[in-house]
Image: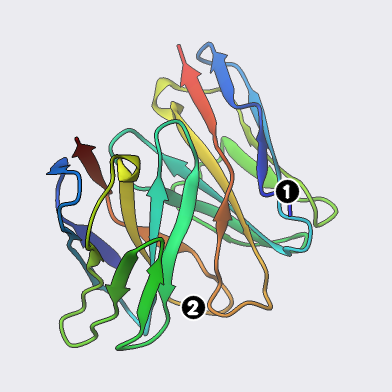
Amino acid sequence: DTGVSQNPRHKITKRGQNVTFRCDPISEHNRLYWYRQTLGQGPEFLTYFQNEAQLEKSRLLSDRFSAERPKGSFSTLEIQRTEQGDSAMYLCASSSQRVVPDTQYFGPGTRLTVL
Amino acid sequence: GDSVTQMEGPVTLSEEAFLTINCTYTATGYPSLFWYVQYPGEGLQLLLKATKADDKGSNKGFEATYRKETTSFHLEKGSVQVSDSAVYFCALIVVTGGGNKLTFGTGTQLKVEL
């Protein structure tokens, strides 16, 4: 069990640029989640996949955000036309549908800084 | 909607002191409850969980009991160590239609000093 991995760990970009983050879940997990965490706050839910299907999206996820999980394994989160307010830690988590209650395991996160 | 309220930090304790971090919740359904810990520079780690009323979750000397009557899930440890210094997050899940998003509190920073 290698855990959830995320790349890159840090990303610095200029306002208006596009960025893409990758998440590799624990291999036997079919559920994958994205959260966003700002300084001094708890993580906030962004979106959720079960296998390759995106089943839920938060209203926090504006049209500039898109997430994919094309083969039900790794996932990508893209932010287009970044804004300074997008600066945050982006967390990925995975879980198995067979475990009740759903117990999510988190990756180390990608810290985004928008200049 | 669902929400979690935690006591504000930072909480500063001497080594071997008793720890309590308060957590209360409101939920639209019957939640499962979790404590996660975030050590400096690291990701969130699951500390313990409880799925129904009166369940006690425990791990690494930490305990929390699911109290439905007071909608609480307070974290306790009898004797803290410097290595317990971290941010602790209380969270809940209410399973609705297959979605299982975690709702987190704002976190409580714990500092343990020698």
Three-letter amino acid code at the position of disc 1:
Thr
Residue A103 in picture, x, y percent from top left: 55, 68
Mark 2 belongs to chain? B
Give the label on residue A2, or none: 1
The residue carrying mark 2 is: B95
Q: Quick check: B90 above or below B66?
A: above
Task: Depth check: give the residue in front, B14 or A97.
Answer: B14
Residue B54 in picture, x, y percent from top left: 30, 88
Q: State the SS at label 2.
A: loop
How many badges with numbers are in the image?
Answer: 2
Q: Are marks 1 and 2 in contact (CB under 8 Å)?
A: no
Q: Residues within 10 Å of mark 1 (few under 14, many from 20)?
A: few
**Labels 1 and 2 within one chain:** no
Three-letter amino acid code at the position of disc 2:
Val
Q: For the view shown, which residue lies furthest in the right direction?
A: A71
Left or right of B46 in this view: B31? left
Give the label on residue A112, or none: none
Residue A72 in picture, x, y percent from top left: 80, 57
**Residue A33 occupies quadrant:** bottom right
Q: Quick check: B102 above or below B111?
A: below
Q: State the SS at label 1.
A: loop
Which part of the image, by quadrant, shows the C terminus of chain B? top left
Q: Residue drawn 71% across and 51% down?
A: A25
**Residue A107 occupies quadrant:** top right
Q: Nearer the viewer, mark 1 or mark 2?
A: 1
Residue B73 in picture, x, y percent from top left: 25, 72
Q: Residue drawn 53% across and 43% down?
A: A91
Left or right of B100 in this view: B56? left
Which part of the image, by quadrant, shows the N terminus of chain B? bottom left
**Residue A104 occupies quadrant:** bottom right
Left or right of A108 in this view: B23? left
